[in-house]
Image (cartoon, helix red, strand yellow):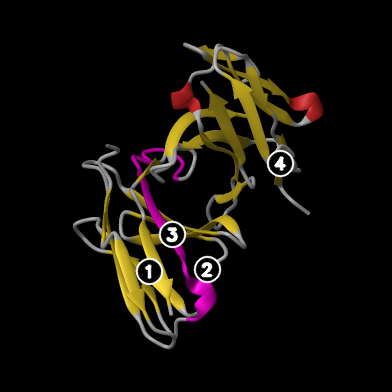
Protein backbone atom coordinates (compact mmCIF):
# COMPACT_ATOMS: atom_id res chain seq x y z
CA UNK A 1 0.00 0.00 0.00
CA UNK A 2 1.15 3.49 -0.80
CA UNK A 3 2.26 5.48 2.19
CA UNK A 4 1.72 8.72 0.28
CA UNK A 5 -0.99 9.07 -2.33
CA UNK A 6 -1.23 11.87 -4.82
CA UNK A 7 -4.29 10.89 -6.75
CA UNK A 8 -4.03 13.71 -9.28
CA UNK A 9 -1.53 12.66 -11.90
CA UNK A 10 -1.85 15.72 -14.10
CA UNK A 11 -3.62 19.03 -13.68
CA UNK A 12 -3.94 21.89 -16.15
CA UNK A 13 -5.14 25.33 -15.18
CA UNK A 14 -5.27 28.68 -16.88
CA UNK A 15 -3.00 31.35 -15.52
CA UNK A 16 -4.42 33.22 -12.49
CA UNK A 17 -6.66 30.34 -11.50
CA UNK A 18 -6.29 28.79 -8.08
CA UNK A 19 -5.31 25.12 -7.90
CA UNK A 20 -5.16 22.60 -5.06
CA UNK A 21 -2.89 19.59 -5.10
CA UNK A 22 -4.04 16.74 -2.90
CA UNK A 23 -1.88 14.57 -0.69
CA UNK A 24 -3.11 11.74 1.52
CA UNK A 25 -0.69 9.85 3.73
CA UNK A 26 -0.79 6.72 5.80
CA UNK A 27 1.09 6.19 9.04
CA UNK A 28 0.57 4.64 12.44
CA UNK A 29 3.09 6.95 14.05
CA UNK A 30 2.12 9.86 16.23
CA UNK A 31 5.27 11.75 15.34
CA UNK A 32 6.04 12.21 11.68
CA UNK A 33 6.95 14.89 9.18
CA UNK A 34 5.36 15.92 5.92
CA UNK A 35 7.01 17.74 3.05
CA UNK A 36 6.20 19.24 -0.31
CA UNK A 37 8.78 19.53 -3.07
CA UNK A 38 8.66 21.13 -6.49
CA UNK A 39 10.45 19.66 -9.51
CA UNK A 40 10.44 22.14 -12.40
CA UNK A 41 11.21 21.04 -15.96
CA UNK A 42 14.91 21.68 -15.29
CA UNK A 43 14.85 18.64 -13.00
CA UNK A 44 16.11 19.80 -9.63
CA UNK A 45 14.03 19.20 -6.50
CA UNK A 46 13.13 22.31 -4.56
CA UNK A 47 11.96 22.17 -0.95
CA UNK A 48 8.70 24.03 -0.32
CA UNK A 49 7.55 23.19 3.19
CA UNK A 50 8.02 20.86 6.17
CA UNK A 51 5.40 20.22 8.87
CA UNK A 52 5.56 18.04 11.92
CA UNK A 53 2.58 16.02 13.03
CA UNK A 54 1.96 18.17 16.08
CA UNK A 55 1.56 21.40 14.18
CA UNK A 56 -1.78 21.48 12.43
CA UNK A 57 -1.80 25.18 11.78
CA UNK A 58 -2.33 26.03 8.17
CA UNK A 59 0.52 27.92 6.61
CA UNK A 60 0.63 30.60 3.97
CA UNK A 61 3.71 31.71 2.08
CA UNK A 62 2.95 34.24 -0.59
CA UNK A 63 0.73 32.54 -3.16
CA UNK A 64 1.29 29.13 -1.57
CA UNK A 65 -0.77 27.71 1.28
CA UNK A 66 -0.96 24.34 2.95
CA UNK A 67 -3.88 22.68 4.71
CA UNK A 68 -2.85 19.95 7.15
CA UNK A 69 -5.69 17.85 8.55
CA UNK A 70 -4.74 14.89 10.72
CA UNK A 71 -8.34 13.74 10.93
CA UNK A 72 -8.30 12.94 7.21
CA UNK A 73 -4.55 12.28 6.93
CA UNK A 74 -4.25 14.96 4.30
CA UNK A 75 -1.73 17.65 3.59
CA UNK A 76 -3.03 19.62 0.63
CA UNK A 77 -1.23 22.37 -1.21
CA UNK A 78 -2.94 25.34 -2.83
CA UNK A 79 -1.45 27.77 -5.30
CA UNK A 80 -3.39 31.00 -5.58
CA UNK A 81 -3.37 33.01 -8.79
CA UNK A 82 -1.23 30.46 -10.57
CA UNK A 83 1.56 31.56 -12.88
CA UNK A 84 3.34 29.86 -15.75
CA UNK A 85 6.43 29.49 -13.56
CA UNK A 86 4.40 27.24 -11.28
CA UNK A 87 4.39 24.57 -13.98
CA UNK A 88 6.23 21.65 -12.45
CA UNK A 89 5.81 18.27 -10.84
CA UNK A 90 4.96 18.54 -7.16
CA UNK A 91 5.79 15.79 -4.71
CA UNK A 92 4.39 15.20 -1.27
CA UNK A 93 6.55 13.18 1.12
CA UNK A 94 6.28 11.55 4.54
CA UNK A 95 9.10 10.97 7.01
CA UNK A 96 8.66 8.42 9.78
CA UNK A 97 11.08 8.16 12.65
CA UNK A 98 12.61 4.81 13.43
CA UNK A 99 15.30 3.68 15.85
CA UNK A 100 17.28 2.69 12.78
CA UNK A 101 16.80 6.11 11.25
CA UNK A 102 14.14 8.03 9.44
CA UNK A 103 12.37 6.54 6.47
CA UNK A 104 11.16 8.72 3.64
CA UNK A 105 8.24 8.03 1.34
CA UNK A 106 7.31 10.08 -1.70
CA UNK A 107 4.08 10.25 -3.59
CA UNK A 108 4.06 9.71 -7.33
CA UNK A 109 3.80 13.41 -7.97
CA UNK A 110 1.27 15.72 -9.58
CA UNK A 111 2.27 17.37 -12.83
CA UNK A 112 0.88 20.88 -12.94
CA UNK A 113 0.68 22.79 -16.19
CA UNK A 114 -0.28 26.45 -16.06
CA UNK A 115 -1.49 27.66 -19.41
CA UNK A 116 -0.84 31.31 -20.25
CA UNK B 1 21.27 26.94 -6.40
CA UNK B 2 20.88 24.70 -3.34
CA UNK B 3 24.59 24.58 -2.54
CA UNK B 4 24.70 20.81 -3.00
CA UNK B 5 26.92 19.65 -5.85
CA UNK B 6 26.83 16.34 -7.66
CA UNK B 7 29.21 14.92 -10.22
CA UNK B 8 29.03 13.82 -12.90
CA UNK B 9 25.85 15.32 -14.36
CA UNK B 10 25.48 12.53 -16.86
CA UNK B 11 26.88 9.05 -16.96
CA UNK B 12 26.45 6.45 -19.69
CA UNK B 13 27.72 2.97 -19.09
CA UNK B 14 27.07 -0.66 -19.98
CA UNK B 15 25.37 -3.45 -18.11
CA UNK B 16 27.61 -5.21 -15.63
CA UNK B 17 29.78 -2.17 -15.02
CA UNK B 18 30.43 -0.26 -11.81
CA UNK B 19 30.09 3.50 -11.34
CA UNK B 20 30.62 6.00 -8.55
CA UNK B 21 28.49 9.07 -8.04
CA UNK B 22 29.81 11.89 -5.92
CA UNK B 23 28.01 14.43 -3.74
CA UNK B 24 29.29 17.43 -1.84
CA UNK B 25 26.82 18.73 0.76
CA UNK B 26 26.13 22.34 1.63
CA UNK B 27 28.71 23.89 3.88
CA UNK B 28 27.88 22.99 7.46
CA UNK B 29 25.46 20.19 6.64
CA UNK B 30 26.26 16.95 8.43
CA UNK B 31 23.74 14.65 6.83
CA UNK B 32 23.66 13.33 3.27
CA UNK B 33 20.80 11.44 1.66
CA UNK B 34 20.67 9.53 -1.60
CA UNK B 35 17.53 9.08 -3.70
CA UNK B 36 16.75 7.35 -6.96
CA UNK B 37 14.14 8.69 -9.36
CA UNK B 38 13.02 6.41 -12.17
CA UNK B 39 9.95 6.23 -14.34
CA UNK B 40 9.03 2.82 -12.91
CA UNK B 41 9.65 3.39 -9.23
CA UNK B 42 9.25 7.14 -8.84
CA UNK B 43 11.28 8.80 -6.11
CA UNK B 44 12.80 6.36 -3.68
CA UNK B 45 14.91 6.95 -0.61
CA UNK B 46 18.09 4.89 -0.72
CA UNK B 47 20.29 5.71 2.25
CA UNK B 48 21.26 8.41 4.72
CA UNK B 49 24.59 9.22 6.32
CA UNK B 50 25.15 11.46 9.30
CA UNK B 51 28.62 12.76 10.12
CA UNK B 52 30.31 9.81 8.49
CA UNK B 53 28.07 7.06 9.77
CA UNK B 54 25.20 5.26 8.12
CA UNK B 55 22.00 6.51 9.70
CA UNK B 56 19.09 5.03 7.78
CA UNK B 57 18.54 2.61 4.93
CA UNK B 58 15.69 2.70 2.50
CA UNK B 59 15.17 0.69 -0.67
CA UNK B 60 18.83 0.33 -1.48
CA UNK B 61 19.86 -2.77 -3.41
CA UNK B 62 22.71 -4.94 -2.19
CA UNK B 63 24.59 -4.08 -5.40
CA UNK B 64 24.62 -0.47 -4.24
CA UNK B 65 26.72 0.95 -1.44
CA UNK B 66 27.56 4.38 -0.13
CA UNK B 67 29.91 6.10 2.25
CA UNK B 68 30.47 9.53 3.73
CA UNK B 69 34.03 10.71 4.12
CA UNK B 70 35.61 12.82 6.90
CA UNK B 71 35.19 15.94 4.79
CA UNK B 72 31.46 15.02 4.64
CA UNK B 73 31.28 14.43 0.91
CA UNK B 74 29.56 11.21 -0.04
CA UNK B 75 29.87 8.64 -2.80
CA UNK B 76 27.25 6.21 -4.05
CA UNK B 77 28.69 3.10 -5.67
CA UNK B 78 26.54 1.13 -8.09
CA UNK B 79 27.85 -2.22 -9.26
CA UNK B 80 26.77 -5.00 -11.61
CA UNK B 81 24.62 -2.45 -13.32
CA UNK B 82 21.37 -3.49 -14.96
CA UNK B 83 19.19 -1.70 -17.47
CA UNK B 84 16.70 -1.00 -14.71
CA UNK B 85 19.26 1.02 -12.79
CA UNK B 86 18.95 3.81 -15.34
CA UNK B 87 17.60 6.72 -13.34
CA UNK B 88 18.25 10.14 -11.94
CA UNK B 89 20.17 9.88 -8.68
CA UNK B 90 19.75 12.76 -6.28
CA UNK B 91 21.83 13.65 -3.30
CA UNK B 92 20.44 15.89 -0.59
CA UNK B 93 21.95 17.36 2.54
CA UNK B 94 20.67 18.80 5.78
CA UNK B 95 22.11 20.31 8.92
CA UNK B 96 20.61 17.53 11.08
CA UNK B 97 21.70 19.02 14.39
CA UNK B 98 18.85 17.38 16.26
CA UNK B 99 17.04 14.36 14.93
CA UNK B 100 18.68 13.57 11.60
CA UNK B 101 16.06 13.24 8.92
CA UNK B 102 13.51 15.61 10.36
CA UNK B 103 14.90 18.82 9.03
CA UNK B 104 14.84 20.41 5.62
CA UNK B 105 16.74 18.64 2.90
CA UNK B 106 18.40 20.56 0.08
CA UNK B 107 18.79 18.63 -3.14
CA UNK B 108 21.57 18.63 -5.65
CA UNK B 109 20.95 18.78 -9.40
CA UNK B 110 21.19 15.01 -9.76
CA UNK B 111 23.25 12.58 -11.81
CA UNK B 112 21.49 11.01 -14.75
CA UNK B 113 22.67 7.44 -15.18
CA UNK B 114 21.99 5.59 -18.40
CA UNK B 115 22.79 1.91 -18.53
CA UNK B 116 22.94 0.49 -22.07
Instruction: Return the residue at label 1.
Output: B66
As drawn, the label of residue B60 is: 2
Kindly state the secondary structure of the residue where label 1 is placed: strand
Tag 3–tag 4 contact (CB < 8 Å): no
Is residue A6 positioned above or below A66 on the image? below
Q: Position of residue A9 (x, y in %)?
A: 68, 41
**Residue position marked by numbered label 4 in the rendering:** A29
**What is the quadrant of residue A109 in the picture?**
top right
Q: Secondary structure at mark 3?
A: strand
The answer to which of marks 2 and 1 sits earlier in the sequence is: 2
**Labels 1 and 3 positioned on one and the same chain:** yes
Asked whether, in this view, residue A46 is left or right of residue A26, the answer is: left
x, y percent for residue B96: 38, 41
Q: Nearer the viewer, residue B91 or A42?
A: A42
Give the residue at x 26% y 63%: B8
**Can you identify the residue that label 3 sits on?**
B88
Separation (CA) of disc 2 from disc 4: 23 Å
Q: Is residue A96 above or below residue A8?
A: below
Q: Chain of mark 2?
A: B
Q: Of the residues tagged 4 and 1, which is closer to the observer? A: 1
Amino acid sequence: AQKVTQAQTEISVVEKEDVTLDCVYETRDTTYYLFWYKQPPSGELVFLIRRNSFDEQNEISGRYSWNFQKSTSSFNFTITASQVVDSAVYFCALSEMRNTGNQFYFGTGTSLTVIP
Amino acid sequence: DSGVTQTPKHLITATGQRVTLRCSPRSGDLSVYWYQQSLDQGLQFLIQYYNGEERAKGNILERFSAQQFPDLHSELNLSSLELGDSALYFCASSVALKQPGTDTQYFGPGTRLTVL
